[in-house]
Image (cartoon, rainbow, N blue to C red):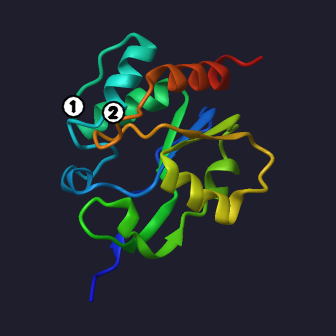
C-alpha cells in the first residue's frame, strides 16, 4: 500500500497575474522542498531566459523571482499516491483548491505544465472563465518541449492590457 504524499503550498501574492500549475512535485522537488527541483527540468532555465535574469538555485531566491515577475506556482494535485515522479502513476488524489489563489490574485491566465496537469485541472475547473492552456511539459522526459510556446503564453498573460 502506498502512502499519501502532500504537495507544496502555493506561491503567489496579490500581484500574481499568471498561475503555472504542474501536476505534482517530482522526487527531486520533494527532496529540496520546492517546485521544479530536478536540475534537468527546463522550467527555471526557461523562466530565466524569458525574463532575461539569472535565478538563484535556492527555494527562497526562486520564490522571490516568480513573485517579482507576477507569476504564481502550484500543482493541481494537492496530495496523492505516486510512484517516484511518474505522472501516470498518480492515484487517490485530491485536487488543489485554486480558488484560494483567485480570491487574492488577479490571475489572467493559467498555464498547465504538461498533459496530466491539464487533464486533472479540467476535471474540476474546466468551466472557469479565466483562460487556461495546455503547455508542453518542461520535464526532461518530454521530447516535445518547446520554449517558444511558453514564451508566447507568458508574453500574452503578462503583457496583456
Q: Residue 57 — which label?
A: 1
Look at the image and tell me in which quarter the C terminus lies.
top right
Classify residue 135 as left or right of residue 48.
right
Relative depth, front residue between 68 and 138:
138
> In the figure, residue 63 lies in which quadrant?
top left
Q: In terms of image quadrants, where is residue 6?
A: bottom left
Is residue 153 among what the camera can see?
yes
Q: In this rendering, would 148 be left or right of 48?
A: right
> Is residue 7 at all visible to an observer of this figure?
no
Q: Quadrant of residue 23?
A: bottom left
Q: Residue furthest front?
A: 143
Q: Residue at x 43, y 75 (%)?
A: 91
Answer yes or no: do the residues labelled 2 and 1 have beta carbons within 8 Å? yes
Residue 29: where, in percent of width, then height? 26, 50
Disc number for residue 62: 2
91 over 54 or under it: above or below: below
Label 1 secondary element: loop
Alpha carbons under labels 2 and 1: distance apart: 7 Å
Where in the figure is residue 80, as x and y percent of width and height?
Answer: 40, 73
Classify residue 130 as left or right of residue 82: right
In the rendered view, tell whether residue 51 sits above or below residue 112: above
Report crowding for label 1: few under 14, some 14 to 19, many 20 or more residues within 10 A (C-alpha).
few
| Residue drawn 60% across the image and 18% down it | 155
> Which labelled disc corresponds to residue 13?
none
x%, y% of residue 85? 28, 59
Percent x, y of residue 81? 35, 75
- Which is nearer the N-term, disc 2 or disc 1? 1
Q: Residues within 10 Å of mark 2 (few under 14, many from 20)?
A: some
Amino acid at each position: 500500500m502506498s502512502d499519501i504524499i502532500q504537495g507544496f503550498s502555493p506561491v503567489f501574492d496579490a500581484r500574481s497575474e499568471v498561475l503555472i500549475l504542474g501536476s505534482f512535485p517530482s522526487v527531486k522537488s520533494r527532496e529540496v522542498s520546492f517546485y521544479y527541483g530536478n536540475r534537468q527540468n527546463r522550467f527555471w532555465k526557461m523562466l530565466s531566459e524569458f525574463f532575461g535574469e539569472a535565478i538563484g538555485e535556492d527555494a527562497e531566491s526562486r520564490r522571490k523571482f516568480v513573485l517579482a515577475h507576477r507569476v504564481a506556482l502550484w500543482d493541481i494535485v494537492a496530495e496523492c499516491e505516486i510512484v517516484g515522479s511518474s505522472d501516470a502513476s498518480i492515484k487517490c488524489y485530491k485536487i488543489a483548491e485554486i480558488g484560494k489563489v483567485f480570491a487574492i490574485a488577479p490571475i489572467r491566465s493559467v498555464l498547465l505544465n504538461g498533459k496530466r496537469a491539464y487533464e486533472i485541472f479540467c476535471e474540476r475547473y474546466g468551466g472557469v472563465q479565466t483562460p487556461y492552456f495546455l503547455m508542453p511539459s518542461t520535464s526532461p522526459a518530454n521530447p516535445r518541449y518547446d520554449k517558444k510556446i511558453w514564451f508566447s503564453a507568458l508574453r500574452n498573460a503578462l503583457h496583456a492590457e
